[in-house]
Image: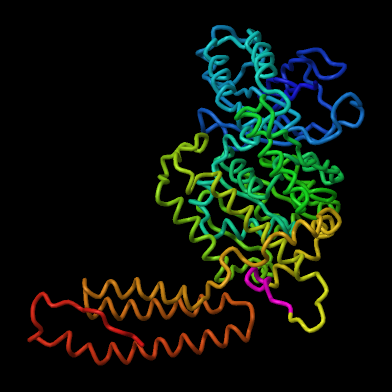
Amino acid sequence: MEDIILHVMLVAFHHRNGPQVEYSCPPLPNQPKDSNTLPDEWSFMPFMCLPDGAHATEEEFIYFHLPPVDKWSEYPQQTLFGLACFRQIDAKDLLYTTADVTRTKVQKSVVVLARQPVLGSLRSKLGLVTQAFFAQRDFSKLDILDTLYENLNASIRFPFADTQLYMGFSLRELVYKFRLKTLQLVKLILLQKRILFFGHSVERLSAYQYALVSLIPELSRHLEDVGSPKLERHQIEAVEEPKLDLESAHRSDDLLRKHSVLHHKSKLYHLGHPLQVFGKGCFFQPYIPLQQIDVLMSPETTSFLAGTSNQIFTHHKQCHIDLVVHADTGEFEVINPAINPWISLTAADRKFMDDIIKSVLQTYTPDDDMNQNQQIEFQGSDDDIRARMEEYLTQFLASVSYDNRPVEEGTKKVDYLSEYNMQWVQQWKKTQGYQVWTGQHKPEYLEMINPGHPCHGFSTLGAVQSQFAARLAELGKSITPTVSRAVSTAAASATDAVNAVVDQQQQDQIQATTNQLFTNVSTWYSSKRKEWLEPKTQPGRGIQGHCLG
C-alpha cells in the first residue's frame, strides 16, 4: 500500500540565495538528499516554509499545498499537502557553524509532505522533533529527520479515520471568532468566490480555512484538486452501501461502528455530498507567499480561498478579491459589494447560528488550545457543529430538489427556499458546483429528506419579541433611562431584522406588525412613566405581569 508521508525536508534561509531546501528524506526524484534543486512547479515552496514576519516568533507552523510535478510520473498527479515547523536560534549558540552562517540568527523549518491532508494530526510530533533538532545546536546532525520520516510512515497509514482530517483545527474557535459570519463564509465558498484570509498568525490563518472547509460534508477527504487552478475535479468514487450479517457470531463493536460510518458516507454520497467548491479554475492555498501572487492574478483562476500575512495582497486590485477576512479581529472587509445581498442571513439562518453560538459560548474560553478539543460534552463540540451544518446543507439540497420537481396538477408548490435567502440560492444555481451536484445526486434519496430550513417557521417578529423581552427585564434595575434605551434599541433591532427578510411582501407584513407592537409599547410606557416616577411609590414594589397586548 502507498505511503501517505512522501518526504521530510529541511528548508533554511541562505544569506545569498534566500530560502532554499537543504535536505530531503527520501531524496526528490533524480536528486541526492542534500540537493537544493526543486522543480519549477515547486519553486515558491521554500518561501512558504519561512513566512513573512516569522522572525518575530519563536515557533510557527505553516500549512500549504503543492501542485503535482508533470515530469514525475511515479508521483501522484494531484495536490500534495505540506506542514512546516519554523524555528530560529542565535548563531553564537551553535556548537558548529559553516561558512554560510553570516547572520546573528539562523532560521530553518522542518517540513513534512504528504498525499493526504492529515498533517494536523502530526503537528505536535513535528514540533517536538523540530525543537529537539534545534537543541542539538549542530545542524549537520540530520539523523533525527530520517527517524521522523520512518516514524510518521509507520504511524499514519491507509485507511485513516475522519478524525485525523480534523485534528489541529478548532471549529469551536472558528465559531467563537466569527459568530454569525461563520455561516456567511460557508455560503460564500459554495458560490466559489475569491476569499482572502489576512492575519499575523500564519497557523491560525490555515486553521480557520481548514475548519471552514470541514463544514462542507466529506470535502476535507476530497481536496485532490486544490493545489492549482489547472487541476480538474477528481471523480469521486461511489461509497457502496455496506453489507453486514447481523446474525454473525463474529460481530464486534468496532465492526458495527465501521458499518455505521460507511452507511452514513454512502447516504451522503447519494445526496450529492461533497458539494463542489474547488476544481478547474479554483485554488486553495492556506498560506500564500508573495511569490505566488501571479496565481491569484491569472485569468485561469476564477475563484480562490487563500491566507496571507502580507498586506500587499489586500490592496492588490488585480487579485480581484471579493472578501478579505481579518483573522485577528473576526471582521469582514467586503471588496465586491455585489456579494452583500447574496450572503445576507435570513431570520431562520440567524436562529440556526444563534443556537450553535450559544452552545459554544457556554463552554468555550479564549484560552482553549486550538489543537486540542477541550469540549467533553457533545453539545457545542466540533462534532456537534459539523453535524448541524450537515443537517443544514442536506435539508437545503432536499429543498432545492423539491423545488426542481414539476408541480402536480391541482397542487401548489411550497416555498422552502426563501428561508435560505433566494438571492443566494439563485447565485448557487449559476455555479459549476450546482451543475456537478445535479448530475451526481440521486433524487430518490433526497425525497426521503424533509425539505425546509432546520429553523423553519422562526419569524423575524419572533426574534424581535425575544430581544424586546430581554430588554424589558432590565426595567426592575433602572426605570426611566433603561426603558428608553431598551425601547429604542429594540426598535433598531427590529428594523435590522426586518431588512434581513428577502421577500418584499413578507417584509411589509412583518414591518406593519412590528410598528404596531412598538406603538402599543410606547403607549403603555407613557401611561406608566408618571406612576413610576411618583414620589409616593411604595418602596420595594416591583413591576408585575403587564400585558403588552
Vertical relation: 39 (above or below) 278: above
Q: Give the position of the N terminus as an image quadrant.
A: top right
Q: Residue furthest front?
A: 247
Vertical relation: 453 (above or below) 479: above
Relative to 460, 286 lies left or right: right
Tell me what residue is drawn at x 25 percent, y 92 percent. 527
The quadrant in which residue 547 appears is bottom left
Predominant SS of the magenta segment: loop
Q: Is residue 317 visible?
A: no
Residue 415: say if magenta: yes
Q: Which residues are magenta?
A: 413-421
Q: Position of residue 499 (x, y in %)?
A: 56, 78
Relative to 60, 436 lies left or right: right
Viewer-proximal residue among 195 and 335: 195
Tell me what residue is drawn at x 57 percent, y 56 percent. 182
Viewer-proximal residue among 279 and 30: 279
Q: Is residue 247 visible?
A: yes
Vertical relation: 27 (above or below) 496: above
Q: Position of residue 19 (x, y in %)?
A: 70, 27
Vertical relation: 368 (above or below) 318: above
Q: Give the position of the C terminus as an image quadrant.
A: bottom left
Q: Position of residue 392 (x, y in %)?
A: 63, 58
